[in-house]
Amino acid sequence: MRISIAAVTGILVQGISLAAGLRILQSNDDGWADFYIRHLNDKLRELHHEVVLVAPPNNQSVPTVFYDDPINGPLQDMVGSRLGPCQHNSCEEGGPMNHNQSRPDLNWVNGHPMHAMQYGIESIVPDLWNGTKPELVINGPNKGNVIWPWLQRIPNAITAAYASAHYGIPAISFAYGSRNGNWSSWNTAKRPRNSRTYVGLVARLLGELQETHEAGKGLLPPDTYLNVNFPPLSATCKEVEDFQWVLAGFAPRGFLDPVPAVEWCGKQTLPSEYKTLHSGCYISIALGNATSMAILADIVAQRNLINRLGSILSCLPAEKRQ
Ligand SMILES: *[C@@H]1O[C@H](CO)[C@@H](O)[C@H](O)[C@H]1NC(C)=O
Ligand SMILES: *[C@@H]1O[C@H](CO)[C@@H](O)[C@H](O)[C@H]1NC(C)=O
Ligand SMILES: *[C@@H]1O[C@H](CO)[C@@H](O)[C@H](O)[C@H]1NC(C)=O
Ligand SMILES: *[C@@H]1O[C@H](CO)[C@@H](O)[C@H](O)[C@H]1NC(C)=O
Ligand SMILES: *[C@@H]1O[C@H](CO)[C@@H](O)[C@H](O)[C@H]1NC(C)=O
C-alpha cells in the first residue's frame, strides 16, 4: 500500500516538477564537503531544483581499477565504519554513512563514489522523496579533466554512466582543468574564484536541456550520459559568456584524432575532447554510450542532442594540419 501511494505521488510530482525544477541527485569524487560541489548545490537550490547530495566523505578521485567491469559487474562490499573524521573535519569518526544533522539532503557514504551513487539512488533518495527517483544525476564539478584514456578509470564519469545504464537516470559528469584545482572546504572564507564561472556554466547547460526537454521523455537520450569538460580559466577565458560549447568525441587512438561520428560542422567526425579543450575557450560536450562506457552514443542519440543544444553549440575554428 505504502509503495503504491508513493508511486502515484511520484508520477504527479514528476509532471509538475519539470516546469518548476528537477529532482537532482548530486555526487562527485572530490568529497561531500568539497567547495565546488557545495557551491553548485547552493546554485541548483537557488534555481528551484530539489537536490539530494550523496558523495564520499573524502577525496576519492584517484584513478581506480577497483571494478573490472564498472558498469555491468557487481559492486564490491562497501567500506565499513570511518576510522577518522571526514575531510576538512566535516564529520566525526565512525559510521558507514551519515548526513548533516540540520540538512538531511547532504549525505556521505563511506566507500567508492559508486557506492555513494548506489546508496543514494536505492535508499537515501527514496527515503527523502517518498520513493520517487531522481530525474537527473549531476557529478561534479570535479577537479581534473576526464578524457580518454581516463574515462573508464575516473569515478566521476563511471558513476554517471552507471546511473544511466543501471537505473535509467540521465546523468552528466562535469570536470574542470586541474590547473585551477582548489581543495577548499565547503565553508572556506577564501572562495576559489573559478567556481562561480563553472557553476554558472552548469546552470547554462541545464537551462538549455530543460528548455528543449520533451514532456514524457528523459532529459537525455536513453542509455547515454554526458561527459562535459571545462578548460582551465585564463585572462581571456574566465566569464560564462567567454566560453563556447563544442560537441566532441572520445578519441580512442590518439588525443588529437578526429572521431568518426555524426555529420556536424561540415564533417563526418567530431573533434576529440583533448583537441577541443586545447583550442581556446571551448567546452567539450561528449555524449557517451552508458552501457559500453568507452564508446560514443549512436548517431540517432547524437542527432537528438544536436537538435536540443543547437542554439548553444559552436564549431572549432578550421583545424590546422598537425
Ligand atoms: C585527491 O586525490 C588525487 C588523486 O589521488 C590527488 O592528486 C590529490 O592530491 C588529492 N587531494 C587531496 C587534497 O588529498
Ligand atoms: C551543515 O548544515 C548547516 C546548516 O545549513 C551548516 O551551517 C553547516 O556548515 C553544514 N556542515 C556540513 C559539513 O555540511
Ligand atoms: C513526501 O511526503 C511528505 C509527507 O506527505 C510531503 O511533505 C513531501 O512534500 C513529499 N515529498 C515529495 C518529494 O514528494
Ligand atoms: C582557493 O582559491 C582562493 C581564491 O583564489 C585562495 O585564496 C585559496 O588560498 C585557495 N585555497 C586552496 C586550498 O588552494
Ligand atoms: C550502446 O552500445 C551498444 C553496444 O554496442 C548498442 O547495442 C546500443 O545501441 C548503444 N546505445 C546507444 C544509445 O548508443
Image: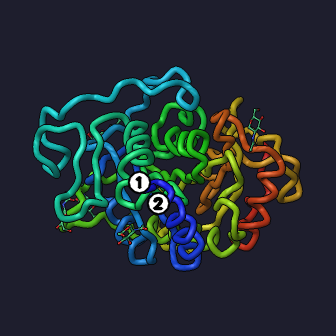
Q: Gap in Å between the C-alphas at discs 1 and 2? A: 9 Å
* Image label count: 2
Quarter-wise, where is residue 251 in the image?
top right
The answer to whether one can see residue 194 in this image is: no
Q: Nearer the viewer, residue 306 or 211?
A: 211
Q: Where residue 117 appears, x then y in whole percent? A: 43, 43
Residue at 69%, 65% in the rendered image: 216
Q: Nearer the viewer, residue 320 or 54?
A: 54
The answer to whether 76 is drawn above or below residue 321 in the figure is above
The answer to whether 62 is drawn above or below residue 143 in the figure is above
The answer to whether 36 is drawn above or below residue 224 in the figure is below
Image quadrant where one finds the N terminus: bottom left
Q: Earlier in the sequence, mark 1 or mark 2?
A: 2
In the image: residue 173, left or right of residue 321: left
Q: Amino acid at mark 1?
A: Pro
Residue position marked by numbered label 2 in the rendering: 6
Q: Secondary structure at mark 2?
A: helix
The answer to whether 168 is drawn above or below residue 292 in the figure is below
Residue at 17%, 38% in the rendered image: 95
Q: Where residue 54 appears, x then y in whole percent? A: 35, 50
| Res 126 label | 1
Q: Where residue 155 appears, x then y in whole percent? A: 45, 38
Q: For the residues labelled 1 and 2, say whether their Cβ atoms are less than 8 Å apart.
A: yes
- Circle 2 packing at 10 Å, graded few (<14), some (14-19), many (20+), is some
Q: Nearer the viewer, residue 133 or 67?
A: 133
In the image: residue 317, left or right of residue 14: right
In the image: residue 228, left or right of residue 189: right
Q: Is mark 2 within 8 Å of ligand 3?
A: no
| Res 254 label | none
Quadrant holding ligand 4? bottom left
